Image (tube, rainbow, N blue to C red):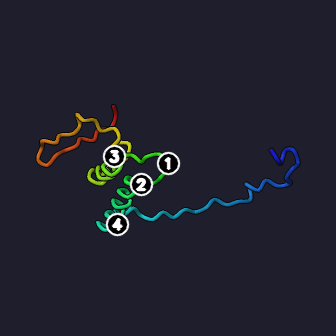
């Protein structure tokens, strides 16, 4: 638009190159790293003296279920009580995609 109305002489987007992105391979957290994450989540969930909204009381459990199942966050949020069997040995959770 700026080129059409003679605000700019040259389109600066044409002169740019796309950035090359080098992604690092994914890796699992070490037990020590995961304990640090759990500690930070606990500290956040139980913080005192903050005037903002109260953090979710289920956030620590959510992080534990994420780690225990390896499911995606949306899959964990879609778990229903009918998908959980606490009487099994060990207790099980069925993660199903879709409604």
Residue 50 rendering spot, x and y as whole percentages:
47, 53
On the image, the x and y values in percent for residue 1 come to: 80, 44
For the residue carrying disc 4, how many other residues have a C-alpha within 10 Å: few (<14), some (14-19), or many (20+)?
Answer: few
Q: Secondary structure at mark 3?
A: loop
Please say if the residues under marks 3 and 4 sit with CB atoms less than 8 Å apart.
no
Q: Cβ–Cβ below 8 Å for labels 4 and 2? A: no
Which residue was labeled with disc 3? 58
- Checking the image for residue 33, the label placed there is 4
List x then y, in percent, for residue 24.
45, 65
Disc 2: which residue: 48
Measure the alpha-carbon separation of dots 2 and 1. 10 Å
In the image, 56: left or right of 64? right
Q: Is residue 55 above or below residue 42?
A: above
Q: Position of residue 11 (x, y in %)?
A: 79, 53
- What residue is rendered at 34% in x and 38% in y? 78
Q: How busy is the neighbourhood of tag 1: few (under 14 within 10 Å), some, or many (20 plus)?
A: few
The residue where tag 1 is placed is 52
Q: Residues within 10 Å of mark 3 (few under 14, many from 20)?
A: few
Among the two numbered marks 3 and 4 on one chain, the one whose residue lies closer to the N terminus: 4
Image quarter in which the C terminus is found: top left
Q: Looking at the rendered structure, which numbered label has been put on residue 29?
A: none
Distance in Å between CA atoms under marks 3 and 1: 17 Å
């Amino acid at each position: 638009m700026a080129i059409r109305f003679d605000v700019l002489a040259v389109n600066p987007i044409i002169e740019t190159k796309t950035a090359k992105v080098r992604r690092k391979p994914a890796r699992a957290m070490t037990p020590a790293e995961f304990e640090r994450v759990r500690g930070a989540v606990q500290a956040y969930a139980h913080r005192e003296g903050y005037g903002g909204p109260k953090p979710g009381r289920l956030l620590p459990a959510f992080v534990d279920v994420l780690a225990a199942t390896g499911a995606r966050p949306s899959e964990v949020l879609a778990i229903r009580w009918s998908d959980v069997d606490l009487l099994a040995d060990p207790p099980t959770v069925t993660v199903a995609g879709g409604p």
